[in-house]
Image: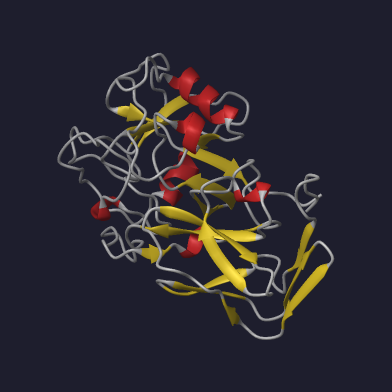
Amino acid sequence: MTTTAEQQTISIHNPSPGAPILLATGPTSISIKAGSLVEIGDRTYSYDRETAIALDELVPGRDYAVGINAMGDLFATVANDNPLNGDFFAGFHFAPGGNAVERKGGDSVPAINPHSLWDIEYRPACPDPRGMVRVIAGNIVWVDIYLLGVDHAIHGTSRFGVAPATGSTLDLLDYKTAKSILEGHGKRLLTYDEFRTAAHGVTERSSAANRPRTTGLDAARTSLYGLMQATGSLWVWGTDGDIDDPRPSVFGGSWIGGELADSRYAHLDYWPGNSNESIGARGASDHLTPA
């Protein structure tokens, strides 16, 4: 990874390049894999054995960047800014609740999301890797953990604890607007196949009791990959996935009509000009292809 003049050049050797260099060893613990090597500037650090990364008390809903301090110790710090613009080589998200394990949603115990682990070579292709999880939907796709927020220009498209973007909290959030917002962040809308895979594991045919006021935990509708408010909260804009003529679509259902809302609930030819309080958006990114 080549950096700006203010940064040092960072490169890594990952013993398992088909996966991130980090390993979640527990809900609040993380390590670098045995056989890893990290070069930062003119310094080289090698790890013959799995090595734990020092963590302070983790804050639920925050992203963390992993680096090596002047003493040569691995550490993680809250990633208030894009970690790719600093001297960091990897990162992860500490979620406000655990992922689903069946089709009954997740829980309310904060935990490192193992699907959120990334490094400078194994990450989403978009400019900022924060707030995303890796989903295997045929190919690898990275999906935003949280619904798009109204303050996306400041905090990015996937932020815990912010007001979700809808047609009532923004001037407009029709298909064209949602698509344009996400493209401005180097992301795109999900296809139907990507959405139903990413949302798998939620409590099907159920919804939140009310319109969501903030992005965050709704344990019953957390997915296997850790998407929060994945269904039954807001419809999200997407496409039917056709390569030549993708149709604007909406997925997942909202808090209205919860008996239908689930991971497979979709309108694949929905009116693209619609904009209202029950439709939001969620971003996606292709997987980085090494040069």
Residue 239 seen in render: no
> In the picture provided, is 65 more to the left or to the right than 208?
right
Residue positioned 36% across, 55% down in the render: 223
Task: State the residue lying farthest toward the left.
Answer: 209
> In the picture provided, is 216 more to the left or to the right than 41?
left
Check the image and report above or below for 211 versus 111: above
Residue positioned 49% across, 33% down in the render: 154
**Looking at the picture, how far across and down is residue 172, in whole percent?**
39, 16
**Looking at the picture, how far across and down is residue 168, in whole percent?**
29, 20
Closest to the observer: 178 or 12?
12
Residue positioned 48% across, 54% down in the render: 63
Closest to the observer: 73 or 37?
73
> In the picture provided, is 195 more to the left or to the right than 20?
left
**Looking at the picture, how far across and down is residue 260, in whole percent?**
22, 39
Residue positioned 26% across, 41% down in the render: 232
How many numbered tags mark residues here? 0
Task: State the residue lying farthest toward the bottom.
Answer: 49
Residue 72 seen in render: yes
> In the picture provided, is 35 more to the left or to the right than 159?
right
